[in-house]
Image (cartoon, rainbow, N blue to C red):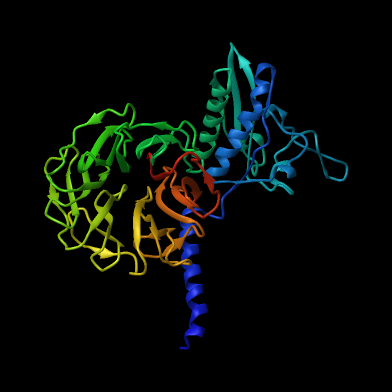
Amino acid sequence: MNKYLLLPVLLASLAAQQADIRLSIIRPDRPTIALPDLRGTGEAQPLMNGINSKIFSEIEQAAVLKIAPKGLYPLTVPQQPSDFKAPTVGPNRQPLSQGPWLTDWSGAPVNSNYLAFGYATVQSGRLALFGWLYDVTQKDTQNAQVFGKVYFGTLNEDGAKKVALEFAADILARFGGKSLAGSRVFFVSDRSGAKEIWSMDYDGANQKQMTFYRSTCISPAISKDNTKIAFTRIGAGNPSIMVHTTDSGRKLNFSNPQATMNATPDFTPDGNQIVFSSTLGGSPANLYVSGADGGGIRRLTSVRSIEVEPKVNPKSGNEIVFVSGRSGKAQLYRMNLDGTDIERLTDGRGEASNPSWHPDGQFVAFSWTAGLEPGNWSIFVMDVASKKYVQLTTGARSENPAWGPDGRHLVFSRTVGRQVQLYSILADGSQLKQLTFTGSNEKPAWTH
């Protein structure tokens, strides 16, 4: 077949693959929810803008629900269940409105499936948020109520944020969603004069320095229970692996093998083992596994090429993806945790690096120089079983992807000019948001 005739067929096939992967992660047939602004009484009133914006942003970024445009909402919004009034039947058997009703929200122009509503007040000096979720497709309010709950917080911005997050989390939980609130991103930043490990909230707030080695610390990995962080330290002798607690930053014991390099660690899901790259058997670096303290070390690969960045499947715990040059340029591979059943995942084009498992153990995000802009690093997501992949980023150099605990967001580093900053993005390529602005920041790891 003529290669010019074949090109449209190949492009159509690639588009179908990308659609399959995106649909598996971010579904287009999400239910629609209406989120009218909640009102506040008394001392709660000044806090309502913060409460409403936080509820909206949490639901929006979770990508498990579509939000009906606020410009389509009815003028009369219920604040509590007693506000609903069933319509009566008029002389011509036409419904006559008596007040807010379910069909105001389920019918045109809103066309929502669900309605979240409520109000805030002050009770005994505390902020009290009354929140309800209704399925407005039901025929009556008794069957429509999904849940109703009261949330309490301090009478200030922190309390307002707390009650908003809790209400949003309860809504998301009804649809299998998971709030990112409380999760943290650990990353590498040079803003203190050396590359150290820092942490921040999922939205970029509360950025804090964790390590103070005054040397290069890179490649952080978080244990599945979020209690430990392992990373590579360069600058005090040979590159070595360090393990700290995530809460206090306290150093834990890890006995590095006698080698010119020990690097790119990752935990097994049970936290009892660490996989890493080492030159223990002589150059070049290959893959090893040891106990969480460095004991009981065992070799996994034996090839005459550099192999780094092993990442353990967080769901099964019995397979690893890693980067290897065994076929030439660095490519993405997978194998069993015991070192058997090795297969290449990427097709040999360009260079691949920085693998990160999706929480469900089905997909892997990684950096690759293949794709729409050969030679420039972009973020890809691959279905490991089928090897189908989708390109998420274009334009600026993008590397170091890490999945969020909700399985719908990634954080990654993006180079624009001379600056390297961290961004978050939804798995369908939307909701790009810059998280860091000071110094150069890279190599993120998101708590589970």
Please, is residue 63 above or below residue 283 in the view? Answer: above
Place residue 304 in its image quadrant. bottom left
Residue drawn at x 36%, y 69% as measured from the top left: 349
Residue 235 pos. (x, y %): 25, 41
Please, is residue 448 above or below residue 330 in the view? Answer: above
Q: Nearer the viewer, residue 99 or 362?
A: 362
* In the image, farthest residue toward the bottom: 1
Q: Nearer the viewer, residue 327 or 111?
A: 327
Number of numbered discs on residues: 0
Q: Nearer the viewer, residue 380 or 81?
A: 380
Please, is residue 232 above or below residue 380 in the view? Answer: above
* In the image, farthest residue toward the right: 91
Residue drawn at x 24%, y 51% as measured from the top left: 318
Residue drawn at x 47%, y 30% as measured from the top left: 206
Place residue 79 in its image quadrant. top right
Residue 288 pos. (x, y %): 17, 50
Q: Is residue 398 visible?
A: yes
Residue 448 pos. (x, y %): 37, 40
Query: In the image, 91: left or right of 396?
Result: right
Residue 154 pos. (x, y %): 55, 18
Residue drawn at x 80%, y 33% as measured from the top left: 98
Q: Is residue 151 visible?
A: no
Q: Nearer the viewer, residue 326 or 339?
A: 326
Query: In the image, 61: left or right of 338?
Result: right
